[in-house]
Image: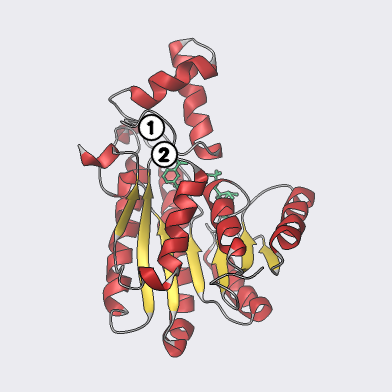
Amino acid sequence: MAGFLNGRTAVITGSTSGLGLGYARALAAEGCAIMLNGFGEAAEIETLRADLETEYGVTVFYNNADMSVADQVFDMIKDADRRLGKIDILINNAGMQHRAPTESFPIDVWQEMLAVNLTAPFLATQAVLPQMKARDWGRIINTASTNALVASPNVSGYTATKHGILGLTKVVALETIETGVTCNAICPGTVRTNLSEHRIDTFAEQKGVPKEEALADYLKQKQPYHQPMGRFITVEEIAAAAVYLCSDAGAAMRGAAFTVDGGWTAR
Ligand code: NAD
């Protein structure tokens, strides 16, 4: 498919569903070759991969690396480099969440969250920077969150790692400031994906009402998921931010926290 990303390649972690898959579709629609990553049933992922190739006419690969394991992060980058020929765009998107008060937050979950949400993006960035700098072009995009900017109760691991990834984003942006490589974070508000679906289920259960009835309250409540716009942000709205960051028009965006949050952090 003809597009401004023809000849470009992207590795997108956590792209078998949700925002990651949205990024994959949006970049493929601009002609970018893609390396998918994430969990899921093998046959379903193969169908997804093949459908993306057919729909957008680009090459799409898949690597099943677990982002909580450092060696697998390195191996995924090596595999992407070998199969795509180079890596122009890296989207660190795989992420996990867990809700618990700080005093009872399980240490094993904390460690896993650090590994997936923060260490994996650090390692993948480390691995791709040399080639991006050598070609003087690159785009590193980290999916952060509104929780990179403001806190919510009972998500200490998530908030800490998302604040952390915004810090990493700014450092990498400064270290590449004189090059054609940019590094930015996208900070989405609430998007209806597997990750938020689980939180909506819990909310509906606590209210004792059917899920669809609980949605409006879920979006409007003041704490802890406040979403002033009163609707979910769409996957496409987040993916469009990534497309912009990959374009020439986005070249001056450096170390930004690109909020697409329905006004959450405007208060
Ligand atoms: P999702 O559950 O639909 O997608 C998560 C993806 O990451 C899936 O492809 C999953 O297989 C993959 N993944 C999870 N753990 C992994 C691991 N250890 N190794 C490799 N892949 C792994 O959820 P989503 O909402 O699309 O989340 C994507 C990112 O967006 C996350 O970083 C999340 O924190 C962030 N985010 C989501 C929202 C929201 O409202 N949905 C808001 C702000 C930020």
Residue 250 as seen in the image, left or right of residue 267: right
Front position among marks 2 and 1: 1
Residue 80 as seen in the image, left or right of residue 55: left
Q: Is residue 66 above or below residue 77?
A: above
Q: CA distance from mark 2 to mark 1?
A: 8 Å
Q: In the picture, which quadrant includes the N terminus?
A: bottom right
SS for callout 2: loop
- Work out whether residue 119 can be spotted: no
Q: Residue furthest front?
A: 2
Q: In front here: 231 or 90?
A: 231
Q: Is residue 16 above or below residue 202?
A: below
Q: In the picture, which quadrant includes the C terminus?
A: top left
Q: Position of residue 75 (x, y in %)?
A: 60, 72
Q: Amino acid at mark 2?
A: Pro
> Circle 2 is placed at which residue position?
106
Mark number displayed over residue 100: 1
Q: Residue furthest top?
A: 208
Q: Amino acid at mark 1?
A: Ala
Quarter of the image for residue 102 reads top left
